[in-house]
Amino acid sequence: MSDPNTRLAMLNLLNALSSGALAFEILADDLAQVAVEVDDDASAELVLGVVRRHRVRALELQGQYAALSTEYTARYHSEP
């Protein structure tokens, strides 16, 4: 069994990854709404590019969360 500090650090990182992914998704949603309201097509495309990058980053964080969650489960919730 691993050290309690490692377990707490993993839980804190899981929380940070989850919160970060959610923040990127919320920001992407808000920016997507801005892109719809922009009159200039070039500006709208620029904002949509940022939206896409935020959505990709959210997916990356979700993937990191899934990998760490799997590791956490293997370490702390496996059969003795």
Image (cartoon, grey):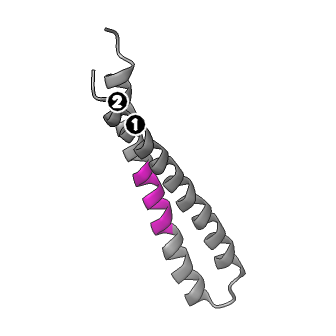
Query: Range of the magenta residues?
Result: 52-61
| Rendered view: 2 above or below 63 | above
Q: Amino acid at mark 2?
A: Pro
Position in image of residue 63 (x %, y %): 39, 45
Q: Amino acid at mark 1?
A: Leu
In the image, farthest residue toward the left = 2
Residue at figure coordinates x 45%, y 68% from the top left: 53
Characterize the local packing of mark 1: few (<14), some (14-19) or many (20 or more) Cα atoms within 10 angstroms: few
Position in image of residue 77 (x %, y %): 39, 19
Characterize the local packing of mark 2: few (<14), some (14-19) or many (20 or more) Cα atoms within 10 angstroms: few
| Rendered view: 9 above or below 53 | above
Q: Nearer the viewer, residue 67 or 56?
A: 67
Can you say which quadrant of the picture contains the C terminus?
top left
Position in image of residue 6 (x %, y %): 31, 35
Q: CA distance from mark 2 to mark 1?
A: 6 Å
From the image, tell me which residue sits under label 2: 4
| Rendered view: 73 above or below 36 | above
Check contact, mark 2 vs mark 1: CB within 8 A.
yes
Residue at figure coordinates x 65%, y 69% from the top left: 30
Is 31 covered by the magenta stretch? no
Secondary structure, magenta segment, majority class: helix
SS at mark 2 in the image: helix
The disc placed on residue 37 is none
In the image, farthest residue toward the top = 80
From the image, tell me which residue sits under label 1: 8
In the image, farthest residue toward the right = 37
Q: Nearer the viewer, residue 65 or 7?
A: 7
